[in-house]
Image (cartoon, rainbow, N blue to C red):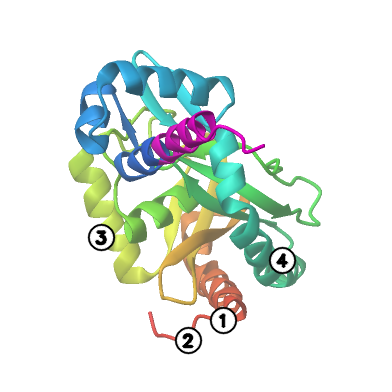
Amino acid sequence: MPRPRGKGAQGVKTLERGLLVLEALSALGEAGLGPLAAATGLSKSTLYRLLQTLALKGFVEEGGGVYRVGPRAFAVGQAYPRQSLLQAARPEMEALAEELGESVNLAVMAGLEALYLDQVEGKKLVRLFTAPGSRAPLHATGVGKVLLAYRGVPEGLSLEAYTPHTLTRREALLAELERVRAQGYALDNEEKELGVRCVAAPVFGPGGEVVAALSLSAPASRLSLEEAHRLAPQVVAAARRASLRLGFTGSV
């Protein structure tokens, strides 16, 4: 006896709408009900119900009436490319950490933050540890500035001050990102945490898009600004080799 098709069809329609909402949030970065309704063509009441379900499952995050893609959606979406990215970057990270003795990190953009995927710890007595899965502000970290420079500044990015060195004016940040693109690497000059400096470079995917940032981190007492600039070409070279492992064939 054939089963009624109504309920299944409705379920598929709801799934399609949920995916539409996630795609809109991915493009917008974050948004309230109004902009989301305009982007999806859904009524606010329908949209609200979908968002509540997505938030319950961890696919959407909400704060003060503003919605953004949640960690579960990011984890699902990154499952395939993340594995290939880790396989491409890990050997170069290990080689760089072995050569310089400092910790090396790999991060990707996750909404309005940088998400650390992997770290190879340095061998020196005092070393920096960043747990894979932890997040960091885009504007106040080396990896974040690389991602912003090559992928653009998302709407709604907050320029919160973490130290006296943090760039909190949009004009200053945009000027910094121009420098990053011109020199091919970014510095975190104690902008997220006093006493910590980083130098980061872009990792390119097969199509020439920046898919991640690779960074070297060390105590500021050991990594002066001059030393960071001196070591930058080695970080850039490691990131480029990781890019080639991913299938990147173009020039930067």
Q: Residue 241: x percent and y percent?
A: 59, 79
Q: Residue at x 56, y 71 (%)?
A: 239
> Quadrant of residue 16 in the image?
top left
The reply to whether residue 221 is visible in this rendering is no
Q: Residue 216: x percent and y percent?
A: 60, 58
Vertical relation: 44 (above or below) 128: above
Does residue 207 appear left or right of residue 47 in this picture? Answer: right
Q: What's the magenta region?
A: 1-19
Determine the CA span between mark 2 and mark 3.
24 Å
- Looking at the rendered structure, the secondary structure element under dot 3 is helix
Q: Decide: marks 1, 2 in contact (CB < 8 A)?
A: yes
User: Label 2: which residue?
Assistant: 249
Which label sits on residue 244? 1
Which of 209/56 is in front?
56
Q: Earlier in the sequence, mark 2 or mark 4?
A: 4
User: Label 3: which residue?
Assistant: 178
Q: Earlier in the sequence, mark 4 or mark 3?
A: 4
Does the magenta segment cover residue 4? yes
Label 1 CA crowd tier, 10 Å (few <14, some 14–19, many 20+): some
Look at the image and tell me in which quarter the C terminus lies.
bottom left
